Image: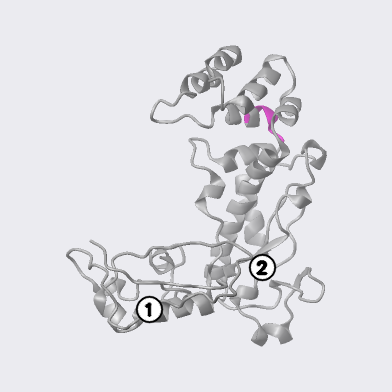
Amino acid sequence: PLGEALRSGVLPGADPLVMVGSTWAQERGGGAAPRAAQPTTPSHKRMLSSTWRCAGHRFSIVVRGLDPRQIEAGKVDESIERLQEDGFLNFFELASFGQAEVRRYEIGAALWTGQWDLAARLMLTANRSSDGAVCDGAIAAFRTGELAKGMELLPEEGAEGLRNLAMQLVLGRPALEALQSAVPAAIWARYLGSVSKLAWNHAVVARLTKQPRRPVAGDLIWDGETGDVRHLKFDELDSKGLSDILLPLPRPGEPVPECSGRLYLEAVLRQLVPGADAPEAAFPFKVSTMLPQARRIVGLPGDVSWDITEAE
């Protein structure tokens, strides 16, 4: 739950934005974690209306170890209501950054700065596993520069991308041309986007720990009339909340827009991608289409349903 993450130091402070199922977490003391209990009231679920339609994402979250006293006192209901009113930190999920030995943003950083040879090598060697997967022999050969041997060790199916990239390099094509020829534009965007998303996540933490947890003049918001991003004005502060605030998503070759979190976002980005950005012409797509211009730092769920069950 977000409340646990806040107390663990992700967002230090005594006033966490959202607490879900962890209201009494500091009062439990030692011993086994209490078991979830059946509610004493007839229903703790708000049913979806018959006309409900989902125009975005739908997530299921399981919160375990609830104390029966929390349920009986209505603490869980209060926490869910706070989730609906105050929202949740709108971080990009961990899956955006990859779980292979070489993280997706490492490859993205090499592409971002035009280190084509490094990017190609990382792509060929990124997926080595700890359980002896079928590609491990090929990846080991790629790591030592034995591209032809690595191609021979690849399985017949499921490794077409690795084979195409290795073949381009074996034929002596420059790394950039090999990447442009063998790697689809969507894969380029995924790698580059992971860099932008990681920098954005760090910038959100900085915005909520180093600045007031409320809108400030100069924050970015969506303009409801033009559909574009603009700066928040001083006379609008009372009418806006954290769920209205945006942070820009950085893109290769483009300056970070002026906003309250710009300096920190630029600093994190330079740590991830030191050096000059690669020219936009090197990328097989327009970087302006890679990701949205900006993203809300706090998300508000459009519809929430919940239930409490007892489990062994």
Crowdedness of circle 2 by 10 Å Cα count: few (<14), some, many (20+)? many
User: What secondary structure is the magenta-colored segment mainly?
Assistant: helix
Q: Which residue bears the numbered disc 2?
A: 246
| SS at badge 2 | strand
Give, as a three-letter code, the residue at label 1.
His
Residue farthest front in this picture: 50
Q: Earlier in the sequence, mark 1 or mark 2?
A: 1
Q: Which mark is residue 44?
A: 1
Return the residue nearer the eye: 172 or 59.
Answer: 59
Please give left or right for residue 265 compared with residue 144 in the image: right
| SS at badge 1 | loop
Magenta span includes 117? yes
x and y percentages locating residue 249 in the rendered image: 68, 57
Point out the stretch of residues depicted in magenta: 114-118
Give, as a three-letter code, the residue at label 2.
Leu
Return the residue nearer the eye: 149 or 116.
Answer: 149
The CA distance from mark 1 to mark 2 is: 33 Å
Return the residue nearer the eye: 187 or 242.
Answer: 187
Q: Does residue 145 show up?
A: no
